[in-house]
Every structure is written in C-alpha cells, then in structure tokens.
Amino acid sequence: MMIMTDTIYDVAVIGAGPAGMTAALYCGRANMSTILFGNIFDSQLAKAGSVENYPGFDSIQGIELVEKFHSQLGRYNVMQVPALISRVTHEGDTFTLVTENGEFKTNSIILATGSRYRQLNIPGEKEFSYKGVSYCAVCDGSFYKGKTVALLGHGDQAAKSAIYLAGLCREVIILSPKPERESVTYAEQLDAMPNIQIVLSSKVLAIEGDQYVERLRYTVKNGPEQVLKVDGVFIEGGTPNSVLAKEIGLDVDEKGNVAVDRPDMHTKIDGVFAAGDVTGGIHQISKAVGEGACAAVSAALYIKKKKSKK
C-alpha cells in the first residue's frame, strides 16, 4: 500500500537504533512533528544478549532495552514507519524521502543508520554468536576477565581492541590474515603487552565448542591445521551503514564514517544531522544515545529558526 501525504514533518529520523530512537524521543518532546524510519527489532542492540554497561541497569537484555526505548516514543506522537529509505531528494529547504510504502516530506533529517558487523561466515560463527563469539571488545570484554581469547582482524581497529582486552584477559591472540602488521600507530603499545600474541598470515577454518566456544581451527600460510583453545572469539572490523549518506551528498571519511561537527552533530548540508555508530568513534549505546540527543536539540533549533523567518 502506497502512502501519499501532503504532511511536511519537522524532522525525519532515519534509523531505529538507540541513536535514532533517542533523537525521535527528544524531537517529540520538543513538540516537533516527527517521523521515524526503521525496524526497531533489526538493530544490533535488539539482537544483543545481556547488556551490562548501560547506566541504570546492572544487566538487561538488548531486546528488553529496545522495548523500553520504544514504549517511550508512544507518548509523544512519533510516527513510525518500519521501512527502508531508497532515495532522498532535496528541493529548496524540503527533503523528500522515498520508500516502498510511499514518499514523505520533511524539513530536516537526522541520519542514524548505525553500522554492521564484519561477519566472516566461517563455520561456528553464527551458532556461537553471543555464546563466545562477540563483535565488540568494549561491550563484552569484561565477560572474559582472566581468560584466553582470540581476536580476528587487522589494522588499527583490531590493535585498539586487543590492547583493551589485554587489560582484562589472561591472553589475547590476534589472528590476522595479513602477512605483515598494519598498525603503526599502536605498534609500541602492542609490543609492550606481554599477554598479546600476533599470528600473521592466518586463516580461521572453524569455531567449535559444545554449548559455548571452546576452540578454533586455523592454518598459517596454508600450512597444517592447528587448534587453539580459547574461551572467546572477537571479530573486529565493522563498517558504518553510510550508503544513504553518500547518496545524499554528505562527506564521509576513508572508513565510511559520516563527517559531523561535534557536539551539535551538524553535517555539511543544512538541515541534515547525523548521530550514532554511522559517525564513527566507539560503538556504544551510551555514545549513540548522547549523540542522538545532541542531534535532536540541533534539529529543534534549526526548525525554530526556520519557522521564525516565515
């Protein structure tokens, strides 16, 4: 069913993760007509297991936290459309958002499309997701205090995660597919950590265990198969969902992160703001929530200024 409407919303929030839902909540509370695009149950938070690093909760399931965010939105007349944006056009100071369900017009946009994990699609990865396989060292590192973990990845992102984990774990083994170390920035810190081991030119064949991860099988330079006993596996290298941002014409860095002016979360296009994982930095719920709030306040000021000129 196609929805055609003459309504021009004050703000459209694209993305229904923590950043997007927070932005929509703040916009609704500011008495702005607000529309939120995205499936709240398709975010990384919704698919996460136990969350133990979000203020106010000793432990809460990701889906439960999403539902709490969602229930708040219902109080402020936020229009929710569980659809993807296929195209955004810009005429004058009004944006048109095209979806499979119809077209929607808005005076401002908050882009909160998040990021996606780098899945390796190796045997056992999906089966042991959140049962020993993690995609976020900062989120889940504390579960492996005093234990041995493998980190699959390379470059600065993997190095930063390994250094963080080394402060918690008994041993961190980096399995890199590259023949040489790539992180010049963190080379000295890596060398200074006696509990970090780096295995270059490695290829992981499978992640195995009973109910939880117990070991992984790998080769080095296509040599004989080896078995590494580990308590957990971290896969690093997520990428921001910035395809739509590029199509809109926003600036992105070499990693695909949307360029913003912090703390106001302005982008290069007037009336377009961005927040959360898509802007880079640490991928944490608290960071996404904070940026969503900042983007919403900036959007409210933008709309207020725009209406005052009419």
Image (spheres, rainbow, N blue to C red):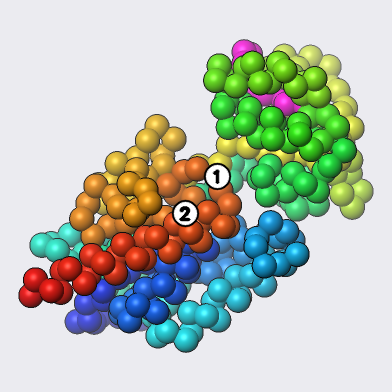
Q: Position of residue 214 (x, y in %)?
A: 89, 40
Q: Residues within 10 Å of mark 1 (few under 14, many from 20)?
A: some
Q: Position of residue 4 (x, y in %)?
A: 25, 80
**Any magenta on residue 184?**
no
Q: Position of residue 278 (x, y in %)?
A: 44, 49
The answer to whether residue 91 is left or right of residue 198 is left
Quarter of the image containing the N terminus?
bottom left
Residue appearing at x 50%, y 56% in the figure: 288
Q: Nearer the viewer, residue 16 or 76?
A: 76
Identify the disc placed on residue 282.
1
**Which SS class for mark 1?**
loop
Which of marks 1 and 2 precedes in the sequence?
Answer: 2
In the picture shown, does residue 283 fall above or below 207? Answer: below
**Any magenta on residue 176?**
yes
In the picture shown, does residue 14 fall above or below 275? Answer: below
| Amino acid type assigned to the residue bearing label 1 in the image | Ile
Residue appearing at x 82%, y 36% in the figure: 169
Give the residues in magenta. Answer: 173-182
Query: Main SS type for the magenta part?
Result: loop
Identify the disc placed on residue 276.
2
Residue appearing at x 39%, y 60% in the figure: 294
Quarter of the image containing the C terminus?
bottom left
Identify the image quadrant of residue 163: top right
Identify the image quadrant of residue 206: top right
Q: Position of residue 142 (x, y in %)?
A: 77, 46
Residue appearing at x 89%, y 32% in the figure: 229
Identify the image quadrant of residue 97: bottom left
The answer to whether residue 168 is left or right of residue 118 is right
| Amino acid type assigned to the residue bearing label 2 in the image | Gly
In the picture shown, does residue 230 fall above or below 154? Answer: below
**Which SS class for mark 2?**
helix
